[in-house]
Image (cartoon, helix red, strand yellow):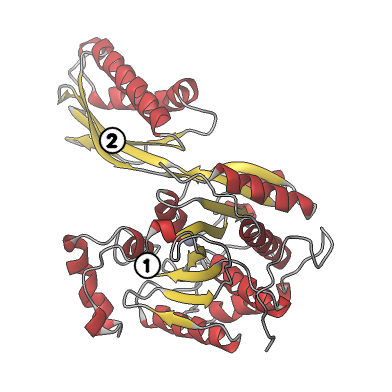
Amino acid sequence: MTSRTDKPISPGETSGPGEIQINVDRLWNDLLALSEIGRGERGVSRVAFSPADMEGRRWLLRRFEDAGIPARMDAYGNVFGRLQGARRDEAPRGEDEIILIGSHIDTVPEGGMFDGALGVLAGLECLRALRERGEALPYTVDVVAFSNEEGSRLGPGTFGSRALLEGISEAEWSRVCPVLKEAGLSAKDLEQPGPSLRPSAIRAYLELHIEQGGVLDASGEDIGVVQGIVCIQSFRAVFMGEPNHAGTTPMDCRKDALLGASELILAVPSVVREAGSERTVGTCGQIKVSPGGRNIIPGLSEISIEVRDLHEDVVSRVAHSLRRRATEIASSRGLKVELTPVSMTPGAIMSPEIQDIIEREARALGLSTRRMPSGAGHDAMIFGKKVPSGMIFVPSRGGISHSPCEWTSKEQCGKGAEVLFRTLIALASTRDSLSRPR
Ligand SMILES: [Zn+2]
């Protein structure tokens, strides 16, 4: 075990700019070892609070402890490892003291070995590398494996991070509590969680994650600097026409609701291009036709539409254009149309200062970078609303995830973890305050 002093460190102080400071072999071995827990014929299944998930959490506690890092699991299944900081300035105690590195180790059923696990194990590796340098950072560093990020068994996911930062509603708690008890989580501490982490105590939140899309893999770039997690607006469009005999109704006398819906589906890409940003996406994923007979002109057709972008105002602009387009289509076909909002999931913008640091540290290592949004939700979405947050992506081969085929090479995982490490040190080496989310 290495002894520690409270000498603060700065990037590049003990090694050259392009040198890898973390232990990539050790990180890779941890990824392999964790992937054996819950491994079945098809992929890795550590669905939240299942026996395999709990075994993974206990394994993680031991990995922290083996490295001499104090660790604990809270009543909600979140696992924490902590490296105490040695802060010597005049800031009030309890304020701006912690840098948090987080992700999750629960998986979807038959998932891969990188989604979530990479971020947590890279965090663990950062703490080990810091200990071995024998130098304390001026900030305490917590590495957290949040529980139930995926929400595949108990929706809506990001449970652990929400429990800490936002609290859990009574309705959700009544569903989750029995599952937690069944998983053996300490019953006496089980209370409906009110927020227990004060955002002002956290200097920054960092998360390394596989991209889960194919942008970096296709471009050959090493590191994605995440600009934010997109917000998602979904709505339902219902076209109403007239059901009628498919044989006796001439083509020019029809009010075919499915044709209206089809025209809107085809219009979505152009509306997204015209009214959205270059990164906006729009999708129709569901369609219902009524009465649904082979020989009946459809009288009613319902489609789902969802629009995603980093910025809520862009999403609203696209939604507004889609509404106008739907009305035009309906009136040109003698139909009626109703557009009903179904849900609006807010996203989160990542701290611009942390984006700059990630980019700078990656480039100092000779890595190529790309600024990009995250189209999938992450724990960083919960933190990004209240705490300056940064997210680092590494490529997913073929853009595949939530699948046993999920793959990121050892070298790519190592690059991401090294960028995480250097970002952590850069954030800890300055007293500059980061602008906080509004
Ligand atoms: Zn994930």
In the picture, residue 141 is in which quadrant?
A: bottom right
Q: Is residue 99 visible?
A: yes
User: Where in the figure is residue 114, as x and y percent of width and height?
Assistant: 56, 66
Residue that label 1 marks: 148
Up/down of 205 relative to 84, above or below: above
Q: Looking at numbered disc 2 in the image, what kind of residue is underneath it?
A: Phe
Residue sitting nearer the eye, 256 or 130? 130
Q: Earlier in the sequence, mark 2 or mark 1?
A: 1
Is 333 situated left or right of 27 in this image? Answer: left
Label 1 beta carbon within 8 A of ligand 1: no
The residue carrying mark 2 is: 235
Drawn side of residue 244 relative to residue 28, left or right: left
Residue in the image at 46% along x and 27% along y:
269
| Nearest the eye: 295 or 160 | 160
Name which residue lies at 53% across and 45% down.
351
Between marks 2 and 1, how big is the CA–CA gap?
Answer: 27 Å
Asked which quadrant contains residue 18, the reply is bottom right
Is residue 295 visible in the rendered image? The answer is no
Q: Is residue 70 above or below residue 336?
A: below
Q: Nearer the viewer, mark 2 or mark 1?
A: 1
Element under disc 2: strand
The secondary element bearing badge 1 is classed as: loop
Residue displayed at 66% across by 62% down: 425
Q: Which mark is residue 136?
A: none
436 relative position to 355: left or right: left
Which of the image's four quarters has the N terminus? Answer: bottom right
Q: Residue at x 34, y 27 (%)?
A: 319
